[in-house]
Structures are given as structure tokens and as C-alpha cells.
Image (tube, rainbow, N blue to C red):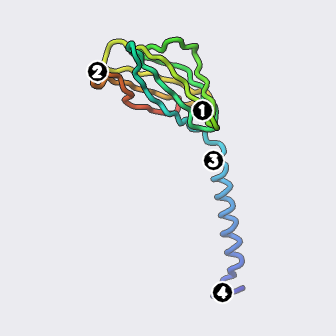
Amino acid sequence: MFILSVEWGSVADWVSGVATFISAIVAYMISIRKPKVNLLTGLDYRKNEKYILTITNETYRYVDLIVSDMKNVEIKDFNGIIRLEPISDRLYKVELELDFCGNNKAKVIFFDPISERKIKIRFKRKNNNWVIGEKLVSKFL
């Protein structure tokens, strides 16, 4: 079909070809993307100066946490690897007993070998109690 000396059927073929190519590239980029880590953290104060760090996995993948660094804090009764189940009908969470020592700031750095992400949790003292200052998730270099 010629309108204004342009065959529009050929233009439509080119446009559909380019759109198909772009959609294939987008699908490939999504498939090779590293999984994200989405953890819900909370810090509770219990009797006898005990603080409990609660970590909940909110993704549909397994998350393994390995402690790579600690500063001014110790985790009691810790075996080395925390395995968090994916989210399902039941909510899986892990409770770690923390013992803070010294200063007004502390931090724990975890590494997830599955997603190759580093999770840094910083604690600070506020009104004579420890609270979570910030949680950072970044790529491990």
C-alpha cells in the first residue's frame, strides 16, 4: 500500500522487528540480574540487658548470612552461617542475641554468598538504649 510514495507495510515490518529485538534484550537483562536481598530487621530489648536482633527474609529465595565483620558487638551462641528460608505461608525469622560493648556505635556486616551482597547493620545508642541506625545492602566487591 503506497501513500505519499511510502510503502507503509515495509515500515510496519521494520518497527515490529526493532520492537522484538528490544524486548529480547530487556528479557535477557532481567534474567541475568542478581537476586536482591530484602531483609526486615528489628532490635528488641529484653530483661537482663539482652538485645535480640530479629532478621526476617522477605524474598522468595534462600538467603545465607555469614558474619564478615563486627565492631563493638558480639553475637552469642552463633554457629557461623544463618540460613533464612524464603517467604511462604509461614514467616521465617531468626533471632540473634547481641552483647554490645563500649562505645555509642556498633556494626555487624553480613555477606550473602548466594546473591553476592553485603548487608551492613549499624547500631547507635539513643536515650540509653541501642537502636538500629541504618541498614545498607550493597554489592560485594
Between 44 and 64, the one nearer to me in the picture: 44
Amino acid beneath label 4: Ser
- Callout 2 amino acid: Asn
Residue under circle 4?
5
2 or 1: tag closer to the N-terminus: 1
From this view, report whether residue 82 is shown above or below residue 139.
above
Residue indicated by mark 2: 128
* Residue drawn where x is 45% and y is 21% of the image: 52
Label 1 amino acid?
Ser
Read off the residue under disc 3.
Answer: 30
Res 115 label: 1
Give the residue drawn at x 68%, y 55%: 24
Report the Cα–Cα distance between label 2 and label 4: 80 Å
Disc 2 secondary structure class: loop
Relative to 14, does residue 87 appear above or below in the rendering? above
How many numbered marks, from 0 up?
Answer: 4
Foreground mark, 3 or 4, reads 3
Q: Earlier in the sequence, mark 2 or mark 4?
A: 4
Mark sitting on residue 13: none
